Image: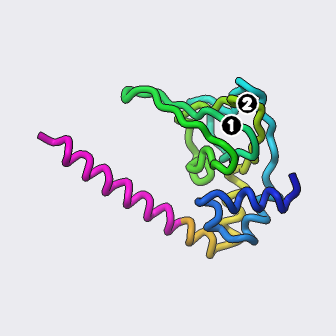
Amino acid sequence: MSIEDDVRLLASVPTLQLLGIDALRVLAIGSETRRVRRDEALFRAGDTADAGYVVQAGALRVSHEDEGGYREVVAGPGVLIGELALLVEMQRPSTAVAISESSVLRISRSMFQRVLEGHPDAARRLRDDLASRTSQAASDMIIASSKLAP
């Protein structure tokens, strides 16, 4: 894929499109393509998370198991996996395994943070979006817990 193809891919991701085309171009130049064979793990739960991934081609099964049970989603082209890892140091809460030959665009946390530092308007838009989503999630939890209360 060319840099312009990568920019178009990044622009198709709702969270990343907030950054704007100039920031996305820098991000595309600084990211790397990684191929993932069928049944190969891109990462496993508990691994140190230092990057996010945008699926370029193929599909990955992202699964998580905890006391609430087992959940999985399939991430195809244009899906960002590991969004929070772009912002904070953490361990992976889930495992991502390719269900077909796949490729992903790897965006390191350090590269992402440099892009935000160089594009403060993009950083503000991202901050505002994350604040809005966090507020909505908190409201949703309050509503859900009130419905569960006796």
Does the magenta segment cover residue 61? no
Q: Secondary structure at mark 1?
A: loop
Label drawn at residue 35? none
Compared with 20, 99 (above or below) is above
Q: Which residues are magenta?
A: 127-150
- Who is closer to the viewer here, 41 or 108? 41
Residue 26 x %, y %: 78, 64
Identify the residue at horizontal 73%, vertical 56% (top origin).
9
| Quadrant (top left, top right, bottom left, bottom right) of the C terminus | top left
Does the magenta segment cover residue 134? yes
Compared with 70, 111 (above or below) is below
Q: What main secondary structure does the magenta stretch of the protein show? A: helix
Q: Look at mark 1 in the image and give the residue it sits on.
A: 59
Identify the residue at horizontal 25%, vertical 52% (top origin).
143
Residue 34 x %, y %: 80, 40
- Which residue is at the far bottom? 121
Q: Is residue 132 left or right of residue 102?
A: left
Q: Which badge, 2 or 1, is on the more N-terminal residue?
A: 1
Q: Look at mark 2 in the image and give the residue it sits on.
A: 100
